[in-house]
Amino acid sequence: MSENIGIPEEGKKLFESLKKDKFPDLSGHNNWMAKCLVAKKDIYTKLFDKKTKNGFSFLDAIKTGICNPGHPFIMTVGCVAGDEESYTEFADLFDPVIDKRHGGYGKDRKHVTNLDYTKLKGGDLDPKYVLSSRVRTGRSIKGLALPPFTNKEDRKKVEKIITAALDTLDGKFKGKYYSLETMSEADQDKLIEDHFLFDKPVSPLLTASNMERDWPSARGIWHNEDKTFLVWVNEEDHSRVISMRKDGNMKEVFKLFCEGLQK
């Protein structure tokens, strides 16, 4: 059950009042979901009753953007995917939102992954100005619902799959997993001191997307012994992979990142 912490009352009322035959007033909303719906209002009517096979609905997808108008100077996305099928079932909205959010990324574009760190140009930043550097990415597991729509059982499956894979790492990637459910007070204090620990979601952008449910069940942090390669489990993504070091050597950060992802 979601607590919907901090969601503006006006936003809640607007969401609860949504009707298929009446387009909502989104004139005060500063997010890409609202902008794309206002630009082509028939998308709202067309998708209103749609759900993925798992049961994630169009209304689930746009709830965070309806409930949270946003800041006038900070453009947010305004919608979330609950599962893999969301990207096709709600493509009439998601495609233009992705295109706008990334400054031109049409539905026929394909993301190109290049993990050849030798091709990186530059990246040696002046340590007088750079205290730490990091590279990170989010990765999800095919076939399992995404955090806005997952359940307790599937969240535990995610944790099991990821930690099993991390347990196979050796050498400079050998590390330990710390479950937020079972970690000791000493471990918690150390992770806070190292600035590794992530908190329960309290932002209304996240709670409107049900991200805080069952906290802290199946959430945790893994890091290698050198504390330069980290994985967050079941935070805002199934996994968030982070490479970092306390200087401006982005070359070495990216090298470690690439090596770790290909392990």
Image: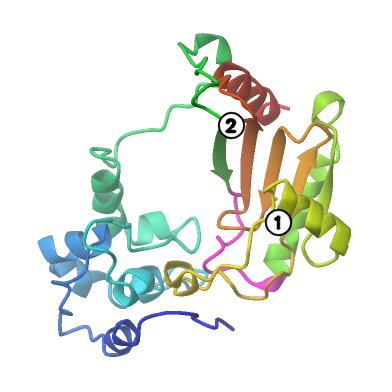
Q: Position of residue 169 (x, y in %)?
A: 83, 32
Point out the image quarter for the N terminus.
Answer: bottom right
Amino acid on which the number 2 mark rests in the picture: Ser
The range drawn in magenta is 140-152
Identified at 41% across, 32% down, the residue is 111
- Residue 143 visible in the current orientation: yes
Q: Are marks 2 and 1 in contact (CB under 8 Å)?
A: no
Identified at 68% across, 65% down, the residue is 154
Q: Quadrant of residue 69?
A: bottom left
**Nearer to me, 134 or 2:** 134
Q: Position of residue 253 (x, y in %)?
A: 61, 24
Q: Relative to 72, is 187 on the left or the right? A: right
Q: Relative to 166, is 237 on the left or the right? A: left
Query: Please, what secondary structure does the residue beneath circle 1 have?
Result: helix
Q: Position of residue 19 (x, y in %)?
A: 23, 86
* Predominant SS of the magenta segment: loop
Distance of label 2 from label 1 (alpha carbons): 30 Å
The number of discs equals: 2
Identified at 31% across, 55% down, the residue is 94
Query: Please, what secondary structure does the residue beneath circle 2 have?
Result: loop
Amino acid on which the number 1 mark rests in the picture: Val
Q: Which residue position is annotated with label 1?
A: 158
Instruction: Mark 2 or mark 1: name the one nearer the start of the chain.
Output: 2
Q: Residues within 10 Å of mark 2 (few under 14, many from 20)?
A: some
Magenta-drawn stretch contains 146: yes
Q: Residues within 10 Å of mark 1 (few under 14, many from 20)?
A: many
Point out the image quarter for the C terminus.
Answer: top right
**Which one is in front in this view, the residue at disc 2 or the one at disc 1?**
2
The correct choice, above or below, for 174 with respect to 57 in the image is above
Q: Which residue position is annotated with label 2?
A: 132
The correct choice, above or below, for 182 with respect to 220 in the image is below
Q: Which mark is residue 234?
A: none
